[in-house]
Amino acid sequence: MTTETDAVDRRVEALDPRRWWALTVISVATLMVVLDASVINIALPHAQAELDISDANRQWAVTAYALAFGGLLLLGGRVVDFVGRKRVFLIGLVGFAAASMLAGIAPNGMTLFAGRALQGVFAALLAPAALSLIAVTFTEPRERAKAFGVYGALQGAGGAVGLIAGGLLTEYTSWCLFVNTPIALAVALAALPVLKESRAEGPRRYDIPGALLVTTGLVAVVWGFTHAAETGWSTPATWLLLAAGLALLASFVLVEQRTAHPLLPLRVIWDRDRGGAFLASLLIGAGMFGLLLFLTYYLQVNLGYQPLRAGLAFLPFSAGIIAAATFGAPLGTRLGPKTLMTAGTAVTLAGTLVLTLLKPTEGYMTVVLPAMILTGLGLGAFFVALPNTALAGIAPSDTGVASAMISTTQQVGGAVGPALLNTLYVSALTGFLADRTGAVSQAVRLEGYVHGYRVAFLASAALFALALAAAGLLITSRRTSAATS
């Protein structure tokens, strides 16, 4: 009896007494990144008009960030493991704030895209550092599940704050992204006393060829989709870009198999549960980012909402994520991450299908509102369960790269999804208007926009259906495994 009591006392003493303060700091930092994504969604229609960005190129405001973020996250995960999680976290915070200033004062589209790409570079350091710090700070499985639940809820809150802030800044000042600067400085100061430094042991070698291959491969794929939106699917350049991108990504896999210090150790993704979770996350990211892009345009262009009203209109979506993240953590412990992930994905799919009922100039209360609530609840449940599956049983030396893979899959999906859906949207709209002769009235044009939106939402639904199949067929674990501390 005494031995058992002593063991419990030692485990309690081993827990970091400032771990919940550390979680607050980490969550606010990642809240900033989520806030930024919400701001750009609300500000993009205004930015497109102000900076004279074409319909085919507007998605680069989203995908430039997602490409840099997703393409460099794996390298960022390795840097986090070996340079130091706290140190990289602070570097990511300060760099992200500086890049946000550049994007916020952009005088033209190219500067905006460059600033967004630079934001992605520093987010690729910040995101895996944040998740790694949670994983190594919370070593008790139940506390870790609760910590990830709090983390997910604050991410949802960040989305809500970003929607309102984006609407206010766009409508009453100018569309801007430098709201991150004061947040980043305050978080950096708060992080200094409460975060503990930690790093993995071993040689500090980085797979630069792998990073170059995966990033250039993703750029080529997204560029191919963008080219198709501009010139159509029949041009040789479109297919050459897509083929080159796929070849580069295949080369990345071959390099990872043979290099002594891979950017992505294939053992991380060959685990069936982990691989299924990553695949589902990739598909969810593609469907979600594309859905939000076109829903923003529907609210502001078709329904005529001003930016602030559009931001407020998105609040039910964020509220759904917050509610699911808050109540999903204990459910995940009881039901298991697979059940929560599949249920959440199914609800998201249902909500997306509701959006295909949109009408050209009305339908917020009858269509958009219920769809937002359903998709928010479903995505919140999915994101709460995802880290518990992806990080369960991971070796300490792979914590950073596995954490990075969570964000990588979402951001790669966020790069490819809007590019693919925007291409389908432009093709659908072009075909719709080509069937009309003579001058096209505003009413017909709005109907054409909705026709394009429906095609994009159906494509999002198809991606969510594939995610549901991946989670249901590949993931076998029905309970939260104890992760290696």
Image (cartoon, rainbow, N blue to C red):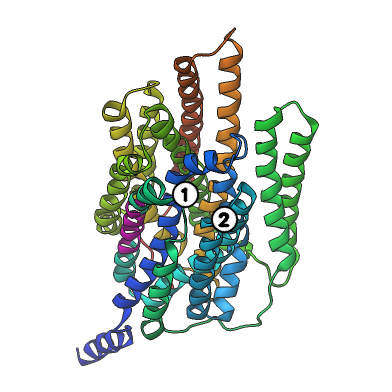
- Residue 377 sits inside the magenta stretch: no
Q: Which residues are magenta?
A: 149-161
Please state the horizontal and vertical placement of residue 478, each as a whole percent of the image. 36, 53
Amino acid, disc 2: Arg
Residue beneath the point at 51% across and 44% down: 47
Question: Most extreme residue toward the top, as rendered?
Answer: 437
Residue in front for this viewpoint, 3 or 389 = 389
Which quadrant of the figure has residue 371? top left
Q: What secondary structure is the magenta-colored segment mainly? A: helix
Q: Is residue 482 visible?
A: no
Which SS class for mark 2? helix
Residue in front for this viewpoint, 187 or 470 = 187
- Residue 152 sits inside the magenta stretch: yes
Amino acid, disc 1: Ile
For the C terminus, the quadrant is: bottom left
Residue beneath the point at 53% across and 42% down: 50
Q: Is residue 55 left or right of residue 144?
A: right
Residue at which label 2 appears: 116
Name the mark on residue 447: none
The residues bearing labels 2 and 1 have C-alpha atoms spaced at a distance of: 10 Å
Mark 2, Cα crowd under 10 Å, few <14 / some 14-19 / many 20+, is many
Please state the horizontal and vertical placement of residue 448, each as a whole percent of the image. 50, 19
Residue at which label 1 appears: 40
Question: Between disc 2 and disc 1, whose residue precedes?
Answer: 1
For the N terminus, the quadrant is: bottom left
Mark 1, Cα crowd under 10 Å, few <14 / some 14-19 / many 20+, is many
Residue beneath the point at 61% across and 36% down: 54
